[in-house]
Image: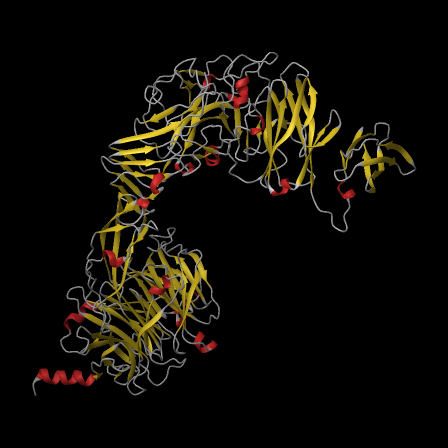
Amino acid sequence: MNKNLLFALILLSQISIAQTPCSGGMAGSYPCNGITLQSYISASTMGGGEGQDSWGWTDPLDGKEYAIVGLDNGTAFVNITNPVSPIYLGRLNSHTGTSLWRDVKVFNNYAYIVSDSNGNHGMQIFDLTRLRSVASPPTTFTEDGWETWGTSGSNRGRAHNIIINEDTGYAYVSGVSPYISGGLVIFNLNIDPENPSIVATYSTGGYCHDAQVVIYDGPDPDYQGREILIGSFSGSDFLRILDVTNKTSISQISSIDYSNKYYTHQGWFTEDKRFFIVGDEVDEENVGFNTRTLVFDLQDLDNPVLHYTYFGPTSAIDHNGYVRGNRFYLANYAAGMRILKIDGLYDAIPSMTEVNFFDTYPASNSASFNATWNVYPFFESGNLIATGFGNENILGDGGLFVLRDPNYDNIDPVVVCQNITATLNKITGTVTIDALDVDGGSTDNIGITERTISGQTTFTCADVGNTFNVTLTIKDDYGNTASCVATVTVAAETTTHLGGGTWSNGAPDVGSNAKISSDYNTSSFGSIDACTCEVDATRTLTINADDYLKTEQDITVNGTLVVEHQGNVVQTDPAASVIKNGTINVNVTSPDLKKRDFMLMGSPMTTESRIGVWNTAFLVLNFNSQNFLPHPDVPAGGTNFADDNGDFYSIYSGAINPGEGYVVRPQSGYNDPTVPPTGRPFLFTYELGTLNNGDITYTNYNNGPAANPNGTPNMVANPYASAIDGDIFMATNGIGALYFWEHLTPPGAPLSGSNLRFDMDDLSIYNGVMGIPAANDPGNAQGTAPNGIIATAQGFGIRTSGTAGTSGTITFNNTMRLTSGNNTLRTATPSSDVAQTEKLIIEIREKAYGFGSFTGIAFNENATSGYDDGYDTNRLATVVSIFSELNDGTGEFGIQTLGSFTNDEKIPLGFATQIDELLEYEISLTSLEGVNLENTKVYLYDRQDNKIISLENKSYTFKSGKGFFNDRFTLLFKSERILGPEETSLDSIALFPNPAKNHINIFSPDTYLVNLEVYDLMGRKISQRIEDESNTFSLDLSNLKTGVYFIKIDTEKGTVTKKIIKE
């Protein structure tokens, strides 16, 4: 017979089963799912009684693949390069005897083999390159090296496992019981692989069953680059994470506990080191649940947490498991080899999914120690080897199975990108792209399972005109990926105005490019919302009063853009531009101005100048805040804008700096206008430069609290062609109040007896809670109470505080810009407050000359009864002032905000006049807003004249000469209500102050007082008959001793007794 034929027959007799695809759930007699049985060699064929552990070796010279199979009595070597015709090359006999446990690992073409409960077996070392030239397989090999450890007897040469870090060349022999408590013996394999030396031992953690050792490149930056061991310390049933970088000083990083732990067996990192997948060998047997696999999240090695628990489809025991790519390969004893996809561990709801299996033990899937011990999935070819207990004489479950997924794929997909333009949805103003949008025809040899893109995928108007790189990643079923970069250009959907309000693609919206190709006037066709806007050459876009053009991005003017008085142009992106290739006009009309009246104004254009928009103005002044000193004749206490010597401002002829306020006298001279006597309006057309957008800053100056105790005045102006929100301006800059010059009184000589420049009485105030009118606007008849909205080019004053000589930055930004309300250019048109809150305004007016002022009081749950920055604003230093105070008598507030309104509020008011005559003054309630206040009566108590009056029905008149009268008045409140069946008019009677020193006031808002009697505990002390009809009375207690008294109050509707305390 031919010699070669005889050899082939011998080999065939050794192979029990040849290639058998999985079909209908079976591969021959083996249950399966998607796994082909390529070949099988029994343990007895390899000279053993049963199979145990296994590993693999790929020859770096020719890529041939070899299975290394642990047997009960030695180690077998099989060439599986042709997996359907494997060649059993031979075996290395056990160094001692037989054992149920043998383990093998590979480093640099050497196999290192250990065995447990097998005498002084030690570590066998075999040179795998000898497999290249086996002339007559099978053969019996000899050891190339041998090492042992321990002392003597059972301490000598015993080990359950060996772990090798192939990146460092260190071997960790584990489970060396009873030597060093079954811990680790560490060998250096680098210097002499056939005669390695022991470099360290580790016993602190107790018995170590198995482990994985890596140079850590996972997500925890604290340990990147360190050599980390994560091991199953089954003696304590803990997973322990060790830093083994320094072999002679190993430290524990952390330990991992879990419920129902019985024998922590073995685990493996996912390739990114994010997760560690672990099996407990006997939990199924002891608890009774199906195969349990634990997944721990190791993003923080110091604090590992249980991330997910997988339960398999059978009750079989889990043994060794390894991760390759996106799969976990599990040796599942009686259930055979199980393959789970692990991509789902990264999902919000984690998961692991079984995708394949091959059951090497068809007889049972119970929790028994039969069948598959190990699976090795690391061959580049995709060949899988599974080894385990038994032989062909015992249910056929032992030996070596060479398996394969026919859809195994180790070839990366071919990815193809295409660049795209992403066009916004005009209504939503957004567009979202997905992976298919940028995929230009990617392919894979098996099939694409997933496409993803990284980078920005949702775009808005803010992105229009820009390009973005996104990365397309294609993945196949085995997790092989390929990526490329695509460029995304973002565009708005263009709609063109064709004339008569007709648009080519419907009316523009937030995602549109509004193209004006025919004249457009918002008064005829409506306001425009768009992403971008273009005005074609020779065409005009006119934004009329109360209308707006609002874009997020650029406005390109190739023709003409006209923003009429009270119109609004708003851009929301601070980086957007108004590109002026044509003409831009912003028209602003002043209120009626009389001789020598002035405006405080700024510019909405970038490069406007004094000789541009204000070229016909008689006078323009700019302010020099660093020169401001309060006029010495202005009394302390009130906020003062009057300079001591006039160097606060100077004649100006330069560029108009955006954000800065200037005094403008637009008249042609001192006698302009001559008619009409009420004055006339002036038209300002801003046209130099382009429209301001984005952050506009103004440098403010501070003169320090010594020179400017109430803050240094700085003059600023709205720099946009739109109204702005004063509340946002104040919040952005930490400003407490805004001051506006109203056009009420032309400059003139001071009133005789008054040392104050009376134009201070033309200032109104807004502090974010409310506005109060200028003192020269009796009853707010001319609507000078500000509402917090600041018109285009409107100038206003602020006060800033800081160390003398320092400066700061005042910022205007796009968040302040409004599309409505641009009608507050200090006109004589009444305006209402924007914020609806509980508030009232009290006015004082001197009757002979008409001087007076206002004080505003508001109620807000965020405020307190003390001083609140941003809620309370000091009064102006007007000729005549009324102001509120804190309860301790301090403060002189033009606007004061208290906490939530209650009926027992008592608010002290002060009064000051600079008129050196005995004159008659009148106090009245100018306005009252809010549900609570509208159902409340407001009373004024004159503490000096001891009178109480309801301000709701009439004003209060009194006489006074020059002076400052702190705490002269008190405001009182009583709710209007319909009395219930258990209530009487007597319930509303109030006594104040109580305790009292010399006088106590009795206040009966619902019925007239008739008689008062005061008693102590021994008898009557005072009796007071009240002759005139009155709701109030001040009772003299000065003759009473300190103590507790009772007062009996007789009224027209009954009698009530109350307790009073005399101090």
Instruction: Inspect this view and state whether residue 343 appears.
Output: yes
Which residue occupies the foreground of this view, 601 or 333?
601
Q: Residue furthest right?
A: 1018
Residue 276 placed where, x, y %? 38, 63
Residue 166 placed where, x, y %? 28, 61
Residue at x-position 65% and y-position 14%: 916
Q: Which quadrant holds the N terminus? A: bottom left
Residue at x-position 23% and y-position 72%: 407
Residue at x-position 21% and y-position 62%: 413
Q: Is residue 565 left or right of residue 3?
A: right
Residue 354 placed where, x, y %? 34, 72
Residue 171 occupies quadrant: bottom left
Residue 211 occupies quadrant: bottom left
Residue 656 placed where, x, y %? 36, 23
Residue 47 occupies quadrant: bottom left
Against 223, is 338 above or below?
Answer: below
Which residue occupies the foreground of this view, 720 or 469?
720
Instruction: Inspect this view and state whether residue 191 appears.
Output: no
Against 583, is 388 above or below?
Answer: below
Against 688, is 125 above or below?
Answer: below
